[in-house]
Image (tube, rainbow, N blue to C red):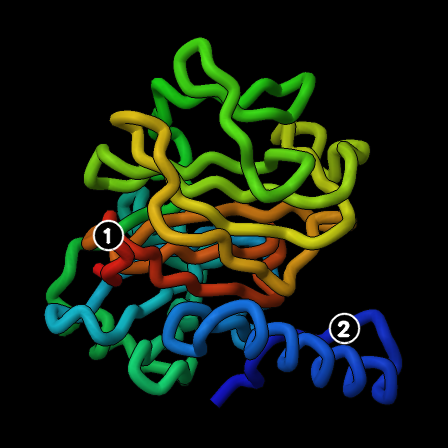
Amino acid sequence: MVSMCLASRAAGPAVAAVTLMVLAVACRKTAPMSRLGCFETPAWAEAGGLQLRAESSGVALLLRHRTTVQRLHEDYSGGNPGVDPGQPAIYRYDSASARLDAAAEDAWRQAGGEVVDCDRQSALSAAPFVLDARERTLRWRDRAVAVAGRTVLILAAAPDGVRVAVLSARGSVAESVLPFLARTGTAGQHYHQVFSRRDASEQGEAVTLPMTSKSVALAGCWSADGRYVVYTDALFHHLCIVQPEAAGGDRR
């Protein structure tokens, strides 16, 4: 099992241990463990692409990371036949136990759920929500929408076409950590929220995430069944998995 919450890789062992302990306490205080799981992902830890696939039962989510070479090999006629890209690294998240464990390719094939390519999903429109790129604020049609943090970082449209996940942070806007992707980072506490595209109402409560975008950009992605939202950093060192609440407070 990969460690719950996350510790800084840049810090020394003693600092990392204290950081992990503090973040674990933060996880317990800010959300039930069945709602939020945050983990280090040492089997990934490099740039690439993420795929999600829920098991038919909805109890578990498979997360498949492909390096650039692996993506070329799978998506473009087998890639270079002289290069062995190896197998993508897969994790399985069990929502009942809040565990993240390594999984085999067979588990991915047998999962049964629809496969989501997170890069492709990120291109989906969140309209009528609009992220003001200059002010980093959220609007629904012509109306401003209040969010938990000061700076809005990400909008992620759900596959159901009804909901939008919003990632915001308490800190002010910082210089883009990935200028060529126009992604803005910031320090301070980060928050996940879900809003309805129909009337901009918030679905459930804000969830505090023990992540930061100060030095690395973050991205968000929904599972096809709408039961999970996954946040990762651009280099895939760690992730947070949230189980959103549907209208009325029920988990999907």
Position of the C terminus, as image quadrant, is bottom left
Residue under label 1, please give it. Answer: 248
The three-letter amino acid code for the residue at tag 2 is Arg
> Is label 2 in a helix, a strand or a loop?
loop
227 relative to 44 in the view: left or right? left
* Residue 73 can be seen, yes or no: yes
Q: Quadrant of residue 189?
A: bottom right
Depth check: give the residue in front, 232 or 249.
Answer: 249
Q: Position of residue 170 (x, y in %)?
A: 71, 45
Is disc 1 in contact with disc 2, using a CB cutoff of under 8 Å? Answer: no
> Is label 1 in a helix, a strand or a loop?
loop
| Residue lying at 62% horizontally and 56% vertically, measured from the top left | 235
Q: Considering only vertical position in the picture, is 252 above or below 75? A: below
* Residue 42 can be seen, yes or no: no
Residue under label 2, please give it. Answer: 9
Depth check: give the residue in front, 38 or 123.
Answer: 38
Q: Earlier in the sequence, mark 1 or mark 2?
A: 2
| Residue lying at 35% horizontally and 24% vertically, measured from the top left | 125
Q: Position of residue 40 (x, y in %)?
A: 58, 75
10 relative to 245 in the view: left or right? right
